[in-house]
Image (cartoon, grey):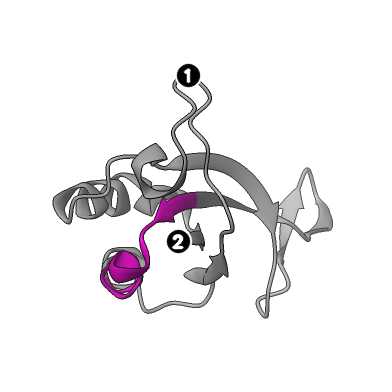
Amino acid sequence: MKKVEAIIKPFKLDEVKEALHGIGIQGLTVTEVKGFGRQKGHTELYRGAEYVVDFLPKIKLEIAIADDMVAKTVETIVESANTGRIGDGKIFVLPMDEVIRIRTGERGESAV
């Protein structure tokens, strides 16, 4: 099993969620996060004073999936989250040793 973590732009969340549902992803965790990459934030003007906004709002998706779904999931996120502009985000694929459903005690892929 794998854990796919994707950092995307907030306004792309609904589009990505619908695309993932369309390929059979039944569950995901969404967290509002802040961060920056190569874009290094931006400057804004407020009441005549300029200040730097270092951390930009992003959305972090976490999805636990079977190994055979990784490529399709990553491809779906890339297609649905892409705007072609800087700051579209990143996808991380991590190994997952064990998954346990707390309510039933199921383990492995059946727990997802």
- In depth, the one of 36 and 90 nearer the eye is 90
- Marker disc for residue 82: none
Q: Is residue 11 magenta?
A: no
Disc 1 marks a residue whose amino acid type is Arg
Q: Residue at x 52, y 37 (%)?
A: 100
Q: Is residue 60 above or below residue 79?
A: above
For label 2, the residue is 1
Q: Nearer the viewer, residue 89 or 51?
A: 89
Residue 89 location, x and y as percent? 52, 69
Secondary structure of the residue carrying tag 2 is loop
Is there CB contact under 8 Å for labels 2 and 1? no
Secondary structure under tag 1 reads loop
Query: Would you identify the image quadrant in which residue 79 lies?
Result: bottom left
- In terms of secondary structure, what is the magenta stretch mainly? helix
Quadrant containing the N terminus is bottom left
Magenta region: 62-75
